[in-house]
Image: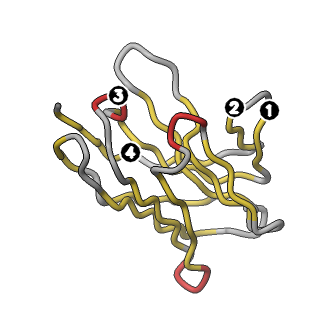
Amino acid sequence: QVQLAESGGGSVQAGGSLRLSCAASGNMGSVNCMGWFRQAPGKEREGVAVFSNGYRSTYYADSVKGRFTIFRDAAKNTVYLVTNNLKPEDTAMYYCVAGTFCGTVDGTVVVGPPKYWGQGTQVTVSS
């Protein structure tokens, strides 16, 4: 099992920034990808940004390209999401995810099973 603990959410005004953190622990042997999904009220959970350990690659949803940056501190088993120029439409619960592989399919960020999820951290952006 893998445990994921998120932190760093909060409330900001449009144009502001937040840095989300996700610390992983447990049996990380099968984990080759870590990243972030989000879910807004009434909407499906969507991939935001993921980091592929094996290929040292990052993948982003089109809606956040140029504004969000994902990076990893391997020594701490922690992945970070720096969110800049936040917009009201970025308001959502952000979930850390770990899986066996990741990438994009038809522009959609995906993570391969088995997947582990954190409890989520709320990001609220006011206009």
State the quadrant of the N terminus.
Answer: bottom right
Badge 1: how crowded within 10 Å, few (<14), some, or many (20+)? few
In 3D space, how far apart are the residues under numbered discs 4 and 2 (Cα atoms)?
A: 20 Å
**In this rendering, would 104 be left or right of 40?**
right
Q: Mark 1 points at which residue?
A: 105
Mark sitting on residue 108: 2
Badge 2: how crowded within 10 Å, few (<14), some, or many (20+)? some
Return the residue found at the far right: 55
Q: What residue type is labelled 3?
A: Glu
In 3D space, how far apart are the residues under numbered discs 1 and 4 (Cα atoms)?
A: 24 Å
**In this rendering, would 4 be left or right of 93?**
right
- Please state which of the two labelled residues, at mark 4 or mark 3, is closer to the viewer: 3
**In this rendering, would 2 be left or right of 93?**
right
Q: What residue type is labelled 1?
A: Val
Under circle 2, the secondary element is strand
Which residue is depicted at the point 35% across and 61% down?
A: 19
In 3D space, how far apart are the residues under numbered discs 4 and 3 (Cα atoms)?
A: 17 Å
Q: Name the residue under label 4.
A: 120
Closer to the chain start, of discs 1 and 4, is 1
Closer to the chain start, of discs 2 and 3, is 3
- Please state which of the two labelled residues, at mark 4 or mark 2, is closer to the viewer: 2
Which residue is depicted at the point 29% across and 42% down?
A: 122
The quarter of the displayed image where residue 17 is located: bottom left
In 3D space, how far apart are the residues under numbered discs 3 and 1 (Cα atoms)?
A: 23 Å
In 3D space, how far apart are the residues under numbered discs 2 and 3 (Cα atoms)?
A: 17 Å
**Mark 1 vs 2: CB contact within 8 A:** yes
Badge 4: how crowded within 10 Å, few (<14), some, or many (20+)? many
